[in-house]
Image (tube, rainbow, N blue to C red):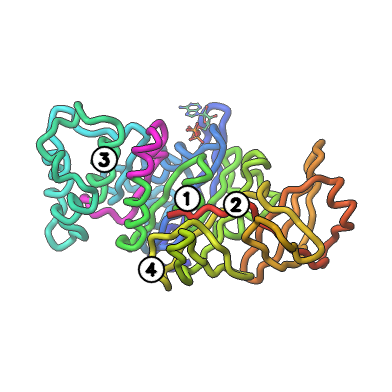
Amino acid sequence: MPEQGLDAQLRLQQGTFQLDARLQLPGDGISVLLGRSGSGKSILLRAIAGLERAEGFLRVGGQLWQEGAHFRPSHLRPLGYVSQSGELLPHLDVRANLEFGYRRVPRARRRLGLDEVVALFGLETLLGQHAAQLPNGQRQRVAIARALLTSPDLLLLDAPLAGLDRHSRAEILPLLEQLRERLQIPLLYVTDQQDEVTRLADHLVLLDKGQTLASGPPERLLSDPRLPLGHPDETAVVLIGQVESHDPHYQLSRIRVPGGTLRVALSRLPPGAETRVRIFARDVSLSLEPPHNSSILNTLETRIIDLFQEHDSARVMVRLDLGSACILARITRLSADRLELAPERRVYAQIKSVALME
Ligand SMILES: Nc1ncnc2c1ncn2[C@@H]1O[C@H](COP(=O)(O)OP(=O)(O)OP(=O)(O)O)[C@@H](O)[C@H]1O
């Protein structure tokens, strides 16, 4: 684990709920904390922020924030914290809200300038508005911008898009993606939404009943059917690829991914750029021969790694090897038996739909 990351073991009893989490996060990029409602995501964030007194240790960017009797109180932890309701100072306007944290940071410690953040978050026209009058989506944009302006060593975002409409979510997600490239601090992002995971996560931590079940690259965790990642019908993997070329005539782009090339809806990124695609397991079917005369554009030749029988279900989940990544196919048990599917067998994965996560 790099010196600049977050390293923690935090234990806490809250009524009958027990948190016992081990976290090792990289020093940059977005770490997504995923877990069902009630799994302890908010309590863990509050413990990291020093708002709950947990036992164990916490080190951020090489600094010890707590261990044993040593406990740095919340107000001395240099972190930005944005909750679902993005608390702003309601009697102040947006500019004053942004300046509130910014002015308290010594000039030499400021990582981002006020004008830079205002431009990045498109807040120019909101500066004179009262915080209390902002619609939810704009309030969250201001709340995230305000947290950034305190030049924190750690940014904690607790489900910042929960409760927002589609339009506001679609506006804020690209802003969060931009932060990935600009911030050299750990960003821990809580969600229970798969689409936010596939779009944002550079590192994924899965929390279940107060315990960290798994931690690692999202490509690996999302393609592991043994992990409780939600309803199997919604199971999807994310592949990190590179834009190869565009075909304006058919409004399609070719994306190079592990194991082959996929045609997707026209990407707005230039050739050579890194991008992500999401493939639902339910959209992948398998065939023993290369398909002919099919309307399905995307077929990858692959090898079965293993098959997982879903409990009390007509379906199986098949994990397929793409070299440095995997995809999943959710097919009927009947088809798996008819095709005599088994580990090591070579198959053609026909992918009905590939979503570009841009
Ligand atoms: N102050 C408290 N006293 C007792 N139990 C609590 C307290 N706060 C939270 N809990 C319990 O701790 C568990 C974890 O709560 P937490 O809010 O961290 O979950 P979560 O994963 O963030 O859920 P959600 O996604 O719904 O926000 C829940 O079972 C909750 O009822």
For the residue carrying disc 1, how many other residues have a C-alpha within 10 Å: few (<14), some (14-19), or many (20+)?
A: many
| x 82%, y 36%: residue | 312
Mark 3 or 1, nearer chain start: 1
Q: Which residues are magenta?
A: 149-171
State how far apart marks 4 and 1 are (Cα).
27 Å
Residue tagged by mark 4? 270
Q: Nearer the viewer, mark 3 or mark 2?
A: 2
Label 4 beta carbon less than 8 Å to ligand 1: no
What SS does tag 2 mark?
loop
Can you tell me whether the CB of the residue at mark 3 lies under 8 Å from the nearest atom of ligand 1? no
In this figure, which residue is indicated by the disc labeled 2? 353
Rounded to the nearest angstrom, the CA distance separating label 2 from label 1 is: 25 Å
Going 41% across and 46% down the picture, which residue do you hit? 48
Q: Residues within 10 Å of mark 3 (few under 14, many from 20)?
A: many
* The residue at label 2 has a CB less than 8 Å from ligand 1: no
Q: Are marks 3 and 1 in contact (CB under 8 Å)?
A: no
Name the residue rendered at 48%, 69% in the picture: 242
The total of numbered circles placed on residues is 4
Q: Earlier in the sequence, mark 2 or mark 1?
A: 1
Residue that numbered label 3 is attached to = 143
270 vs 97, left or right, is right
Question: What SS does tag 3 mark?
Answer: helix
The label on residue 108 is none
> Residue 246's spot in the image, x, y percent?
45, 67
Mark 4 residue type: Pro
